[in-house]
Amino acid sequence: MTRSFPSHRFVFFVAAVILFSAALTVSALQLAAAASPAPAVSKSPYGRLPDGTQVDLVTLANAHGLEAKIMTYGATIISVKTPDRNGKLANITLYLDTFDDYLRGHPLFGSVVGRYANRIGGARFALDGVEYPVTPNAGKNHIHGGREGFQKKVWQAKRMPQDEAAAVELTLTSPDGEEGYPGTLHVKLVYTLTNDNELKMDYSATTDKPTIVNLTNHTYWNLAGAGSGDILGHELTLNADAYLVADEQKVPTGEVRRVKGTVMDFTEPHPIGSRIKEVEGENYDHCYVLNKRPGEPLSRAARVVDPKSGRVMDVWTTKPGVQFFTARILNNPRWQVGGRPYSPYDGLCLETQHFPNSPNCANFPSPVLRPGETYHHVTVHKFSVEAATSKTISRRVVWQP
């Protein structure tokens, strides 16, 4: 004879199991938190320039095992290690094996570029009635601060003690007239790796003469891991309803065009490679106009998902634009890792910035900085992981801050 289990006892039993499980979970989380190492910052020699100047490597680590490495040459990110859905760590930024490899030249892997990121048409701009010619290093145009931009400078590094994050402050002084820019510019950049699994880049600058400033980081991301293959299967969402129309030399003309109904539309997630053959040159290299709410300083710029590894990267910024670049130019056999040369589309860039050619387009937000003012720009990359999915199962984040 089968005895039934009284319904009220069953309810009590289930409730007790849930409470017990919750208690175990809380206890496990508390133990894990207690066992987690505190955020840490370390610095070690990395190499020397031909003139003997030492270049250091700064390592930031948070309490959850994330790690970022920055060298003082170019304030360059050479590693960001995050876990996949199975907990396996990988460096998700493109990098080179040795410091000497960087000195031989590279396409700005992880570097900070300035004094003006991206392009200035005709390599000249007018400010307060004075025309300033700057170094033409992209045909007749200027790009990324010139031949000796901030990516080729040794920055000074100082640890920034914090309770819930690992941080380093990098500083640089650009003299009056460097690459044609007016004013002595004092630049400060703080990289912070938080226990919320965010990599924050906080830029500031001051000047003693009116000048223009546009700083960004040129990291190439591959959420499957550097050297693992291309990013064409990564899914991208951009918080942008428009982009800047550019001429054949990629210099914006001043026209802003809507993306709806075109291959430029990433307002909904799309695999990056799904329409790339329809793009001019089969390569995205376009500045998107971010959707900004009035009074909203930090807003979402992009979300990137690698379905294979489960890694997710969300990007937030105070800047009005983001240059989306799919790196078809990666075809130099010297640019390699572990003996494997990088190939076209092996990384993607999301360069948060002022609009390119802003000094020559009156309808664009102004990049002018004057004495007594402070340039300030924040970009945040937030890392998480999604569970395995299928076409019929919605995604679920399983590892996040």
Image (spheres, helix red, strand yellow):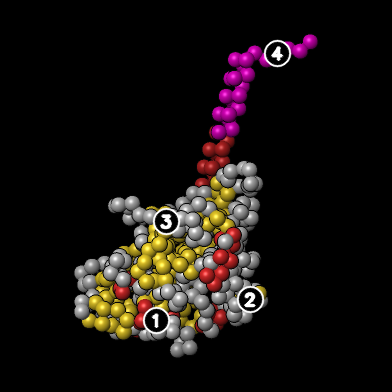
Farthest residue to the right: give it: 1
First in sequence: mark 3 vs mark 4: 4
Question: Which residue has dot 2 on it?
Answer: 341
Question: Which secondary structure is most common in the magenta stretch?
Answer: helix
For disc 3, the marked residue is 241
Who comes first in sequence, dot 1 or dot 2? Answer: 1
Q: Which residues are magenta?
A: 1-22
The image's mark for residue 4 is 4
Q: Residue at x 47, y 85 (%)?
A: 49
Secondary structure at numbered mark 3: strand
| Location of residue 1 by image quarter | top right
Q: Nearer the viewer, mark 4 or mark 2?
A: 2
Q: Position of residue 124 (x, y in %)?
A: 32, 81
Q: CA distance from mark 1 to mark 2?
A: 29 Å
Disc with the residue nearer the chain's start (1 vs 3): 1
Question: Which mark sits nearer the N-terminus, 4 or 2?
Answer: 4
- Residue 251 shows in the view: yes
Q: Specify few, some or many for label 4: CA neighbours under 10 Å numbering under 14, 14-19, or 20 or more.
A: few
Q: In this rendering, would 391 be left or right of 172?
A: right
Between tags 1 and 2, which lies in front?
Answer: 1
> Of the residues shown, which amino acid type is indicated by label 2?
Pro
Q: x, y (%) of residue 325?
A: 50, 68
Residue type at the position of mark 1: Asn
Residue 141: mark = 1
Residue drawn at (56%, 80%) of the image? 101
Residue 321: tell me if it is visible. no
Give the answer, above or below, for where 139 lies relative to 264: below
In the rendered image, residue 49 lying in the magenta stretch gets the answer: no
Q: Residue at x 37, y 78 (%)?
A: 121
